[in-house]
Image: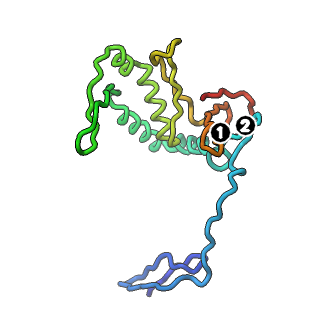
Amino acid sequence: MAEVQFNKSGVPLMGYGTRGVFMSTSGTPAVKPKMAEPKNPERDKTTVDKIDISDWGTGNNFPATADEIINKVGVLNSGLKFIRNFTIGQGIYPVKVTGYDDKGNEKLEIVTDPGINRFAQSRIVRRYMEKAVRDYMKFGCAFVQMIPNADGSKMVGLNTINAKYSRLNIADNSGGDNKMYHLGQMAGCSTKRRIQYL
């Protein structure tokens, strides 16, 4: 005997039976399924000190919810750490792109500047990569702060800003004016203290 399960709109979802069964469907349901309507962008924002910040998930709480779930499941947390360590590997090796071959592949040349190589293999970069890849694996993005020296001639530091407490402002009509805001408790926006990064 064959059984067919239908959804609320009358569309067959699954057929099953105790013996070999041949099933086919044709046509469309009598009632068209309701299509998703465009959302009102005004609902998906939080305003802090007259600044509109894009919500990240329902209630502006996606990172906290994701972090809670990941930390509850030991295998998932360990798996993400393993993937992070595998991704980082032996670190990074600086190269310059000197051109492209006929297939469009980059031609690379190893950077021989000892200062750049020392910086790329430093603990600062390693710690940055660990935190950035952690945020990327957990939340799908990472926020980076590059710290130049006093005259701006070279980079002396990298800082990963915890994505769990970071959000972007709503861009203007031209897509510009993006700033990242970091609040101590982003979900409730209970604190007015913020650090603004350009």
Measured along the vertical axis of the image, is residue 2 above or below residue 34? Answer: below
Q: Which of 72 and 13 is in front in this view?
A: 13
- Who comes first in sequence, dot 1 or dot 2? 2
Q: Which of the 4 image quadrants contains residue 100?
A: top left
Q: Label 1 neighbourhood size at 10 Å, few (<14), some (14-19), many (20+)? A: some
- Could you tell me which secondary element the residue under label 2 belongs to? strand
Residue displayed at 35% across by 16% down? 118
- Could you tell me which secondary element the residue under label 1 belongs to? loop
Would residue 167 be seen by someone viewing this image from the given angle?
A: no
Residue displayed at 24% across by 40% down? 101
Residue displayed at 60% across by 29% down? 198
Tag 2: residue type?
Answer: Ile
Q: Residue 179 carries which label?
A: none
Measured along the vertical axis of the image, is residue 42 above or below residue 176? Answer: below
Measured along the vertical axis of the image, is residue 76 above or below residue 35? Answer: above
Residue displayed at 30% across by 22% down? 111
In this view, the residue farthest toward the top is 150
Which residue position is annotated with label 1? Answer: 169
Inter-mark Cα distance, 1 to 2:
7 Å
Measured along the vertical axis of the image, is residue 164 above or below residue 151? Answer: below
Q: Do labels 1 and 2 touch, CB within 8 Å?
A: yes
Count of marks placed on residues:
2
Q: Residue 163: x and y, percent?
A: 56, 35
Which residue position is annotated with label 2? Answer: 51
Image quarter in which the N terminus is found: bottom left
Q: Which of 182 and 64 is in front in this view?
A: 182
Q: Residue 14: x and y, percent?
A: 47, 76
Q: Which of the 4 image quadrants contains residue 49?
A: top right
